[in-house]
Amino acid sequence: MEDFIDETYKRVEQIINYKRFNIRSFEEEINVSNNSVGTAIRRKSSFKSNVLNKILHSFPEINPTWLLTGREEMLISNKVEGIANEPDSVYKLENISVQVKESLLKLLLEDEEVKKALMSHFK
């Protein structure tokens, strides 16, 4: 497995700039403690999974694959093949939730160590 450098902090910073938040207002928006995001960005450190989950929950248009790996685009496409555009926002949120889960599952299954751990857990 190739060396992995976690640059999630850069992508979180991109979200903050895209949403036109300052760090404090972003922390309030995703409901995390003061300076938790700012400290991670300053230290160039990784985020705990609960912070990443809160970001994805607060901003369902953010592509989880992009947030975790930097691959793909930052925003999830509004166009879903084979499904008519419905004006109902609840339907769109449910659809985005399914896309997020599918992306996370696909990402997890790409990692051989995770795949082995899951297989041993379910035996």
Image (cartoon, grey):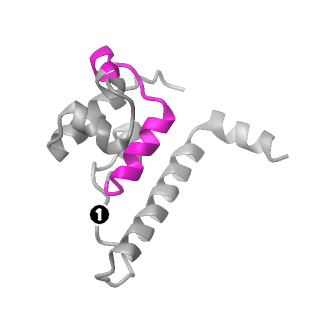
Q: Nearer the viewer, residue 47 or 27?
A: 27
Compared with residue 56, is residue 33 higher up or lower down, i.e. above or below?
Answer: above
Identify the residue at image location x=39%, y=74%.
Answer: 90
Residue 27 position within the rendered picture, expressed as x and y whole percent measured from the top left: 31, 35
* Image height of 49 relative to 110, above or below: above
In this rendering, position of residue 19 left or right of residue 81: left
Question: Which residue sits furthest right?
Answer: 123
Q: Circle 1 sits on which residue?
A: 77
Q: Residue furthest top?
A: 43
To which quarter of the image does residue 45 belong?
A: top left
Chief SS of the magenta region: helix
Q: Is residue 116 covered in magenta?
A: no
Residue at 39% across, 67% down: 93
Quarter-of-image position of residue 76: bottom left
Quarter of the image where one finds residue 71: top left
Q: Residue at x 42, y 44 (%)?
A: 54
Q: Nearer the viewer, residue 110 or 59?
A: 59
Indicate left or right for 69 with 79 as reference: right
Q: Which residues are magenta?
A: 39-61
Q: Amino acid at mark 1?
A: Ser
Magenta span has 46? Answer: yes
Where residue 19 appears, as percent x and y from the top left, is: 18, 46
Relative to the observer, which residue lies in front, 74 or 29? 29
Where disc 1 sits, the SS reads loop
Q: Quadrant of the N terminus?
A: top right
Q: Residue at 33% across / 28% down in the picture?
A: 37
